[in-house]
Amino acid sequence: MSSSAVAADKQSPAEAAEAAKIQRDAVISRATAFINGSASIAARRAEADTFDANDAIVDANGTEHVRFQRSYNGLPVIGGDFVVHSRNDQVSKISQTLSTSNRPSTTPGISSDEAIVEAGAHFGGNFVGAPSSRLVIYARGASPVLAHEVILNGIKADQTPTEMHYFVDARSGKILAQWDGIETARPGPGGGGCTATAAVGTGNSLTLGSVVLNTSSCNGQYQLTDLTRGGGKTSNMALKTSGLGSDLVDTDNTWGNGLLSNSQTVAADAHFGVAMTFDYYKVVHGRNGIANDGKGALSRVHYGRNYQNAFWSDSCFCMTFGDGDNGASILPLVALDVAGHEMSHGVMSRSANLTYSGESGGLNEANSDIFGSMVEYFTNDANDTPDYVIGEKLFPNNTNGYNALRWMFKPSLDGASPDCYAPNIGGLDVHYSSGVANHFYYLLAEGAVVPAGFGVGTPKGLTPASLVCNGNTSITGIGRSAAEKIWYRALTVYMTSGTNYANARASTLSAAADLYGNGSAKYNAVAAAWSAVSVN
């Protein structure tokens, strides 16, 4: 063992954290020097641009990847984010979607009040609280435009909260773009008092039977707070649609009875599902929590009345799960892949942060489906056989998986999602435009193989030819382990907020080259899988 390794072994946790901070600061400093100097043109830098680093990754071979947010004259540049890739003091590449260093005048032609009125007309009234507005540079189009970003909050008819972002051209008053800050599973119409200690309880869940739950003990009572995973907590919204919910408290550390009649039952599902997702990211990808800072998030159950959805909200750093219609046609939305889906929206918000609109929005949704499915395989629970079907456990008496939210191997089984890429795909709801990336991932991992129960002789009658868009039925999967690592690296190292399908192909090829070699069998498999869904 080297002397440096011995020294590292002797470090206290505080010393190790300080050493990591020093390394991170040095990596960011080098990347900042590049964009201030030799890489300024490549970064599409304008004279009044400033940059804020929000992530830094260092590979085992010393390659450094630093993610930056951009401002211009103090205004955020929406779509101006980028990643600097360097090694041995040389920039190898910059990942970005911004194509110009041109910037607009920062003098608006209309006021923020006028922009709010325009956005309000599109929102339709009935917003909650006061609207907010700020000037930004909107750079997701061909040329950057000065815009008012107006945010309006409200509650949709189906009880989903909405946080609509409208980008209003600050000269013409036209709406340039809009998207919702609330990211859902489906398309839609605490206090203290003592020092808590870690405990281990039992959950009698709805979908997985008996599961182990990490909880906390305080003054002889137990709470669904996981001190082993950064203090992640599950709370009871008690059918409300506002607030953070109340603590779930128990005296024997046994939660639920496996039935909907007990309010703790679905809390056990959600708490366990989020824990397994936390473990998946840590074990498989080395990511310590949503923000990679070791901190857990809030999970809220029993949201709304007969609320048939689940969602991630950045504003509360929380996952929220509705009760469905309590099993009449849809069960509470606390299945394992749904928990993985929603927590992965959080990971997305702390990495590439793909904008929830257009092709980037479809990729955002696909990312959550991909990792939701991989969490199932990681957990490998016999009560929820791992598969590439999203949300099949939400439907009563659904042993064949024919009822679900999405089918990754054949997206069009939902009647709305395309199997193959087309130029107009960005105009679809993001839960449908996600299908092409889901389809790519299945083919990459498994190849043109029809899942059991969906082949010839079944009601679905799928064939290998029906799984590809280009007739390449010989496409062979590289396995889940390689596929998930390629996708995660593409997400965290190469994708940016404006990544579209063409960029996603390039990002995953770059990730495959990093991990397995340019021109390797796995690299070629990535290219073949994208071509099989018409992304060329």
Image: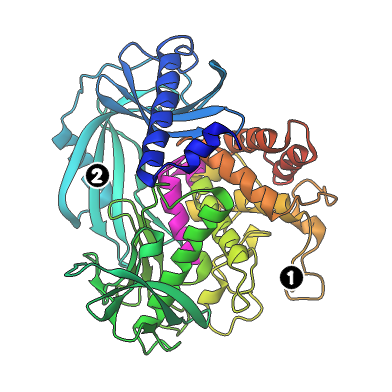
Which residue corresponds to the image point at 32% horizontal and 54% vertical from the top-left? 317
Count the labels in the image: 2
Crowdedness of circle 2 by 10 Å Cα count: few (<14), some, many (20+)?
many
Residue 81 in view of the camera: no
The x, y position of residue 223, in whole percent, is: 30, 74
Residue 352 in view of the camera: yes
Q: Secondary structure at mark 2?
A: strand
Find the distance from the CA under tag 1 to the CA under tag 2: 44 Å
Taking the magenta stretch, the answer to whether it contains residue 314 is no
The colour scheme of the drawn protein is: rainbow
The x, y position of residue 166, in whole percent, is: 30, 41
Instruction: Judge by depth and name the residue closer to the eye, 459 or 475.
Output: 475
The amino acid pointed to by label 1 is: Phe
* Above or below for 494 versus 153: above
Q: Earlier in the sequence, mark 1 or mark 2?
A: 2
Taking the magenta stretch, the answer to whether it contains residue 349 is yes
Identify the magenta region: 338-361
Which residue corresponds to the image point at 26% horizontal and 50% vertical from the top-left? 123
Instruction: Judge by depth and name the residue closer to the eye, 479 or 139.
Output: 479
To which residue does mark 1 refer? 454
Mostly what secondary structure, the magenta segment?
helix
To which residue does mark 2 refer? 151
The amino acid pointed to by label 2 is: Ile
The x, y position of residue 495, in whole percent, is: 52, 36
